[in-house]
Image: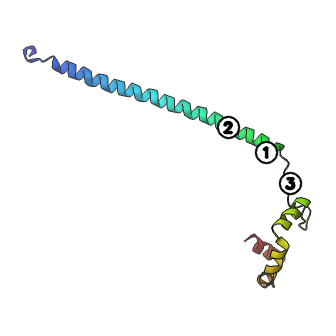
């Protein structure tokens, strides 16, 4: 039985085993590097998100609408209204809006405005 044994088969077997082992090892290193990069990116994004929240918290946010009811514009809101000619737009579209709002309750008119 050993007289028919060819050592070439051992070399082929060891070569295949080495290639598979190297491939698995390389894949493992790559996978670890990808996970490390993902963790680093996640930490970086959390840091940026926190910085943006801090910046936004420090910014004064002018509200265009006063908090009282009925709705009133602040000085900032009046500037916006003047710049976009909101009063003229309202006059141009008032007739159509009156037709849609006719015979509706207040909450239905509010829902109409939201749509």
Residue 15 in the image: state x and y as whole percent: 26, 22
Color style of the picture: rainbow
Circle 1 is placed at which residue position? 56
Q: CA distance from mark 1 to mark 3?
A: 12 Å
* Total number of numbered discs in the rendering: 3
Q: Is residue 46 left or right of residue 37?
A: right
Q: Residues within 10 Å of mark 1 (few under 14, many from 20)?
A: few
> For the view shown, which residue lies furthest in the top direction?
3
Per the image, label 1 sits on a secondary structure element best described as: helix
Residue occupying image coordinates x 8% and y 16%: 1
Comes first in the chain, label 1 or label 3: 1
Circle 3 is placed at which residue position? 62
* Whether label 1 touches label 3, CB < 8 Å: no
Q: Is residue 75 left or right of residue 48?
A: right
Circle 2 is placed at which residue position? 46
Camera-nearest residue between 40 and 111: 40
Comes first in the chain, label 1 or label 2: 2
Camera-nearest residue between 112 and 92: 92
Instruction: Tell me, for residue 102, which label it has, or none.
Output: none
Residue 20 in the image: state x and y as whole percent: 32, 27
Residue 91 in the image: state x and y as whole percent: 83, 79
Per the image, label 3 sits on a secondary structure element best described as: loop
Comes first in the chain, label 2 or label 3: 2
Per the image, label 2 sits on a secondary structure element best described as: helix
Q: Residues within 10 Å of mark 2 (few under 14, many from 20)?
A: few
Q: Residues within 10 Å of mark 3 (few under 14, many from 20)?
A: few
* Residue 37 versus residue 59 in the image, above or below: above
* Whether label 2 touches label 3, CB < 8 Å: no
Camera-nearest residue between 75 and 5: 75
């Amino acid at each position: 039985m050993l007289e028919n044994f060819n050592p070439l088969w051992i070399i082929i077997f060891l070569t295949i085993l080495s290639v598979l082992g190297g491939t698995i090892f390389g894949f493992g290193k790559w996978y670890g590097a990808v996970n490390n990069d993902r963790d680093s990116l996640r930490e970086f994004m959390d840091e940026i998100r926190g910085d943006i929240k801090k910046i936004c918290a420090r910014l004064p946010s002018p509200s265009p609408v006063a908090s009282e009811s009925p709705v009133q514009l602040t000085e900032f809101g009046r500037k916006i209204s003047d710049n976009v000619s909101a009063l003229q737009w309202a006059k141009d579209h008032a007739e159509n809006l009156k037709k849609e709002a006719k015979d509706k309750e207040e909450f239905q008119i509010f829902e109409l405005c939201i749509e």
